[in-house]
Amino acid sequence: MPDSPELPRHFGADALHADRPELTRVEYITAVIHFYRAEMQRATQWRMRLDNTTNWSILATTAVVTFTFGQKENSHASIIVGMLMVLTFMLVEARRFRIFDVWSERTRRLERNFISPILLGDPAAATPDWGRQMAADLREPRFNMTWLQAVRARLIRNYASLFLLLLACWIVKLQGRNNGNLHDQASWLEAMRVGPVAGGVIAGGVALLYAGLIATAILGRRSRREEDFFLGPEIDLE
């Protein structure tokens, strides 16, 4: 097995910003490696929390659909409740995704600008002055995406299919209640009625919900420049 290439004593000094004279190169690298491990652990923990809310949404959708079609007499209102539950889970997950993205983006910067140059034996970092940029971020932490962008990311990645499934099941359930009068608007509105709540109110609420989801998918896009640091299948919002 060939020996690792011998690196110069001051390898990576410019790229790694080891500008503290009281720190040796070994001490600096050790500190950064420990920092990387801590950030990776945080990213992993928040990634698991993302999986939890997604699993809850899938279980809730399965339970609602199973109950609704379990008996013909069961109301379609349970599907509407399911839509609201999935919406709540998506909003909770969007908040968690913003926090996960902070740790994930930091680990990605370290991989690109610290670990990769060491493995290649090339002191040039991919991003000039990245160390001071990260230090500024540590002093004043901030999110890398807006709340709307986070909601869109989770909607496109996980929740769009659940909302479409619930909408399709809702329409099928209503079709069974309006006696097959597909072109009779009054029959559809009567089938949508839930107790004292008129069918028009129910239809308007569902339409407003899905219009909001479509608007989020359109308006929550990142710009190309902002997406430069967000590489990988989980964070790429295209």
Image (cartoon, helix red, strand yellow):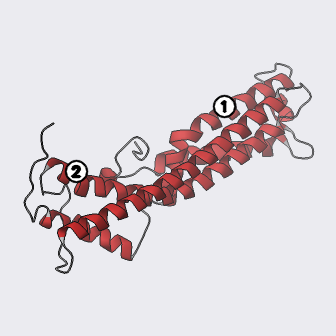
What kind of residue is marked 1? Leu
Where in the figure is residue 21, as x and y percent of width and height?
A: 16, 79
Q: Is residue 181 left or right of residue 132?
A: right
* Quarter of the picture holding the N terminus: top left
Residue 53 visible in the snapshot = yes
In the rendered image, the vertical position of residue 213 relative to residue 168, given as above or below: below
Q: Residues within 10 Å of mark 1 (few under 14, many from 20)?
A: some
Residue at x-position 22% and y-position 50%: 116
In the rendered image, the vertical position of residue 228 relative to residue 159, given as above or below: below
Q: Which residue is mark 2?
A: 116
Q: Is residue 129 left or right of residue 140?
A: left
Alpha carbon separation for disc pair 2 and 1: 43 Å
Where in the figure is residue 102, as x and y percent of width and height?
A: 43, 60
Circle on res. 221? none
Residue at x-position 51% and y-position 59%: 147
Circle on res. 165? 1
